[in-house]
Amino acid sequence: MNRSTVFLSASAAAQRLGVSIKALRLYEQRGLVTPQRTAAGYRSYGPKEMARAAEIAALRALGLSLAQVSRVLEGDPRSLEPALAAHEAALEGDIRRLVQTIDRIRGIRAGLASGQVPADGELARVLNPSATSSVSFELPWPWGGERFELNEIRPLNYIIGPLGSGKTRLAMRLAEQLPDAAFLALDRVKEGNAAARLEADMALKARVDRTLTWLVDEGATKSEALIALLASLEAEAPAVLVVDMVEQGLDQTTQEALIALLRQRAKFGARPLFLMTRSSAILDLAAIGPEESIIFCPANHSPPSRVAPYPGSPGYEAVATCVASPEVRARTAGMIAWRSEAA
């Protein structure tokens, strides 16, 4: 081993690559990259392993599943072309939005030259378009009608809280108040409903089939629950979807594959999603990105609030106690909190 060659630990390699340690382990489990080992048995990434991992991370950023990544690295380009086409389309969309912003700025400057002051909020809308995405309403029972405001709605929003905290009522009210929004309830898996919907809309069926293939490549298990969820996620409308307990009926690997897909889409400005969850596979606090936010409903029925995903931030520990592994969630599914009369 060349003493001048730099070798990185798993944590340092993940930081340099901009991925999680969990992602590096997944690449290793799938045989995509094999780190070296130190004398003490720790993983070590040299230039060769880092180059390979960087290529994997780049392909993943394009939206390829791990199975597709494997095929591309083995010399099969068929999975790469449609991914590059989609990325090109996303970049063209960004260019169109930038051109529109430039035109609006030029319009404001022209107005200034003639002594016209920008209208209230116009500069904010031009300089920070995401800030215009907001909602405000009075909270339902069990709250006391307090005013709730949610500004800068992110592509991926988690709604979490302990049993009886009112998170379902909050989710339903969000679906009522947000423009062109819908609430996807737990009864989404009704016999024949998803199948009938897909048979009636072949374009939707094609999108669902394509996404299902991607998820199965990632280790997901095909099921009625997953297909019913995808039928709504892949629909062109509504503009905002609020999902009750997104993990319902999905095993751990399926949950992990699903959230990986949704995180990937969030980076490209997908429509906003509000996901009710209590699963640590869905809400991985160590993996929250800038496109995501956490809305926490406290047990004492204080107003819901946004919680930053950092240890020590207000509400973080309370959020952490609300999530559990899919295995634990499966054991407690359908249970409600109760107290004996003697208590």
Image (cartoon, helix red, strand yellow):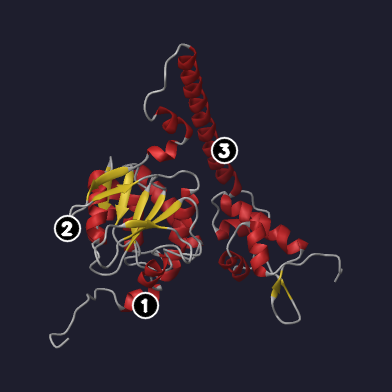
Residue 92: x and y in percent read 54, 33
Query: In the displayed structure, does residue 209 sit left or right of residue 167?
Result: right
Q: Nearer the viewer, residue 224 or 342?
A: 342
Disc 2 target residue: 141
Q: How crowded is mark 1: few (under 14 residues within 10 Å), some or many (20 or more)?
A: few
Along the polypeptide, which appears first: circle 2 or circle 1? 2
Q: Which residue lies furthest to the top in this view?
A: 114
Q: Which of 113 and 80 is in front in this view?
A: 113
Q: Which amino acid does label 2 sit on?
A: Trp
Q: How crowded is mark 2: few (under 14 residues within 10 Å), some or many (20 or more)?
A: few
Q: Quadrant of residue 188?
A: bottom left
At 47% from the left and 66% from the top, the residue drawn is 312
Q: What residue type is labelled 1?
A: Val
Q: Is mark 1 on a helix, strand or loop?
A: helix
Q: Is mark 3 on a helix, strand or loop?
A: helix
Labelled disc at residue 328: 1
Q: Residue furthest bottom?
A: 342
Contact between marks 1 and 3 (CB within 8 A): the answer is: no
Q: Quadrant of residue 42?
A: bottom right
- Is 101 above or below relative to 303? above
- Is 1 above or below relative to 66? below
